Image (spheres, grey):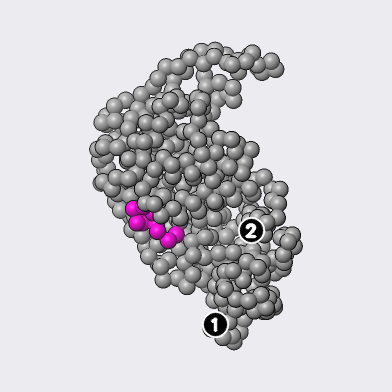
Amino acid sequence: MGYVIKRHWAPEVAGIGIPRRDRQWGAYDAFVPHPLAGRKFVFEGAVAADIADAELAIARLDSQAAVLTDTEALARLLLRAESVASSRIEGLSISAQRLLRADADRAEGSEVRDVTALEVLANVDAMTYAMNDASGQITVARILEIHRCLLSQTRLAEHAGSFRSTQNWIGGSDYNPLSADFVPPPHEEIPKLIDDLCAFCNDDGLPAVAQAALAHAQFETIHPFVDGNGRTGRALIHVILRRRGLAIRVTPPISLILATRARDYITGLNATRYIGPPNAPEAASAENRWVSTFAAACSRAVADAETFERRVEDLQSEWRERLGTTRADSTALAVLERLPAAPIITVREAESLVGRSFAAVNGAFTSLVDAGILTQTNSVRRNRAFEARELIDAFTALERQLASPDGNTKISKPARPVPLRPRRTAGT
């Protein structure tokens, strides 16, 4: 909900070689949203039920994770899945194996030349920072640091961790906002709007899922950065859910669902950009539609995360059977339990993860390779690396599953580009 400011666009340069239509001068409307803090929100009965269902689902996923053998391993996998999906919405597509190999190279100190992998890994870093910051309060500095993590290693590093100082826009021409689909607020409006957003995020008056939905829509409307707005705004969702105590241990892959329901996602966000007073019936209707869409995405994300969790548990049980009789405190079992956190792993990394000697880990890797659990790969240049291919396939299958409106690509085709079906994993 908000109002428009009339602005005039004047090209800075003549633009030799640029089509005449892209060298236009003229007026455009920049949208400025009304503040969120202190505003009263009323949710219809069905929407309130959707919110309650989503919160129960997220809390259940988090509480179940508390009793897992290795919660951190599952948490890292789901956080990586969420980061990949958030990047995919922005057009950064990469296979799980390619990303994991680049991550392993980076961990070993090797140069990573895969530009797409580096951008997605930066999103993983930003999400990791966002989820691990124990400060509690959501501040401007925290939002800027998430953005800095995201862009600091990219071609746009000069803009990392700072708000834009120029007008941006979505859609239309690359050269002017005159034909844009949406023009965010002028840059001088950003500081007060972000201050208000932080105040709203630190208030506990609304249900957490509704708060996350409205905060995300407001952030995307403000569009405060030159680039990385979508990924930063989706990280903000999880910061809020964690601050409110719903998702403390694991990250439900909400972006995977939003990417699948891209049309509903964009339509919902656009609906909240109603030009008019915040207390208008049209404003309330738009907010209800968006929050309902978001809550449904949360519930679906949890359901598919739970399916994935069971698949990982089943896979680890199969692995234990393949290993045969072994001591409960064996290094091989210790490595096996940590594989979900590091599906591509080196001996050096395993030493750190399980706290065992090089000789013990090296012997464990031999056992795991003999059992068909690990396969040696030459992807890491400085050290021998091994990959759990069945686990990587399960990760890929999760992305395919969440890309299908019905949760099964054999029933309904993926609604967006997805990796090829894993060769060794059935079911999706």
Three-letter amino acid code at disc 2?
A: Ala
Which numbered disc covers residue 107?
2
Across and down, in percent, residue 406 comes to: 48, 53
Residue 248 is a magenta residue: yes
At which x and y percent is residue 323? 62, 81
* Residue at 40% from the left image edge and 20% from the top image edge: 5
Question: For the magenta stretch, what is the residue range?
Answer: 242-250
Residue tagged 1: 329
- Residue 382: x, y in percent? 73, 61
Residue 263 marker: none
Residue 304, placed above or below residue 224: below
- Residue 206 visible in the shown view: no
Residue 328 placement (x, y as % from top left): 53, 83
Residue at image coords 62%, 15%: 13
* Residue 325 sits in quarter: bottom right
Write down the quadrant of residue 427 in the picture.
Answer: bottom right
Answer with left or right where residue 345 lies relative to residue 304: right
Q: Give me the C-alpha separation between circle 2 and circle 1.
A: 27 Å
Amino acid on which the number 1 mark rests in the picture? Asp
